[in-house]
Image: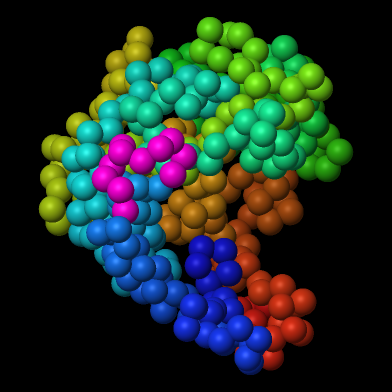
Amino acid sequence: MDLFGNVPFVTETDAIGVGIPKQIKRAELFAYIESELKAIDADLIAPKANEYGRADKAAAWALLARIYLNAEVYAATPKYTEAITYCNKVIGAGYTLHPKYKELMLADNHLNTDEFILTINYDGTYTQNWGGTTMLTHAPCGVSGDSSGTNGTWNCARVTQQFFALFDTARDVRGQFWTSGQNQNMTELLDAPKDGFSTTKFRNKTRSGAVAPHLDPGKNWTDIDFPLFRLAEIYLIYAEAVLRGGTGGSNATALGYLDQLSARARPVAGTNAQLTLPYIINERGRELFWECFRRTDLIRFGQFTTSNYLWAWKGGVQNGTAVDSKYNIFPIPSTDLSANPNLKQNPGY
């Protein structure tokens, strides 16, 4: 729904091996996902009552809140009131912000059940793979193995100077950037691992700085669990939905949630939260970066393909440029189109 929009679609009512999948429109897919999440509510275990890493009611509520925030993109219908409703349900379940931001993405982050709602669990012994948090820990350019808790960097991931500029790194503890040996500006795009800072947000070490509990001898694979949903996102959804006109919330409560995030992020300098949409898109960048939100957020704010927000090498130009709006959604792969004549390519491709 988020990446391709109009996709092949089957359910358990479709006979196996009879015919080929039909194509569903993005708005219809949204309605289906929404209905399924609501339908299973009574069957799910109560919030915080399931075993770690398994979905409960709060996980479904968090997913509903997330898709409702993006409903105007997915289905051309705003559902900000519904987003607030499900944020309230998650918040009412008793989650709290973990007090130390830098402990969120460590090898013992399975202890962060105060904030984490649902995780993808990784274990250096039993779930070895080259993706997930293994990639997020190894990929940043320049980061030493001692710092990352691994056998070293793959030199393949950097952040642009525009994203780095979102942070007051002297005050905001979330600005976990690796700058040693790196140039701040990405003057080159290809084969230039020294151009652009990188990040140490994901580290395969424990809170005490010790090695990961299940560190493999080669230091390849990580113990860092990836949070699919955490309370900080719910606070940000609530605040944005209130600003966009949703009912069932209040400006005062929304600002209070932003203040909580700011106070954790800036424990020495104090809060400077603002209840404005420009603040929220930047705060989502600071709070949730490398957690797979940025593209979706920029599309919702009208900044992904437009000139409203430029970054280094956007559109293949060093200083950035606007691109065709068709890139707000991916093309359906040609292999799918050739295999299934029911599919029609997304507009513009």
Q: Is residue 215 above or below residue 82?
A: above
Quadrant location of residue 147?
top right
Q: Quadrant of the C terminus?
A: bottom right
Is residue 191 or residue 235 the one in the foreground?
A: 235
Residue 135 shows up from this direction = no
Colouring? rainbow
Residue 60 drawn at (x, y percent): 35, 53
Residue 92 drawn at (x, y percent): 19, 40
Q: Is residue 22 above or below residue 177?
A: below
Q: Is residue 311 above or below residue 165?
A: below
**Residue with the most extreme right position:** 191
Specify whether 210 is left or right of 129: left
Residue 62 drawn at (x, y percent): 34, 49
Is residue 45 or residue 252 the one in the foreground?
A: 45
Question: Residue at 54% across / 52% down in the picture?
Answer: 295
- Read off the magenta span: 44-54
Question: Residue at 65% across / 13% down in the picture?
Answer: 211
Residue 43 shows up from this direction = yes
Residue 7 drawn at (x, y percent): 57, 76
Question: Residue at 60% across / 59% down in the picture?
Answer: 322
Main secondary structure found in the magenta portion: loop
Specify whether 137 is left or right of 282: right
Q: How many marks?
A: 0
Quadrant location of residue 106?
top right
Question: Residue at 31% across / 20% down in the picture?
Answer: 263
Quadrant location of residue 185?
top right
Is residue 273 or residue 238 the one in the foreground?
A: 238
Asked whether residue 106 is drawn in magenta, I would say: no
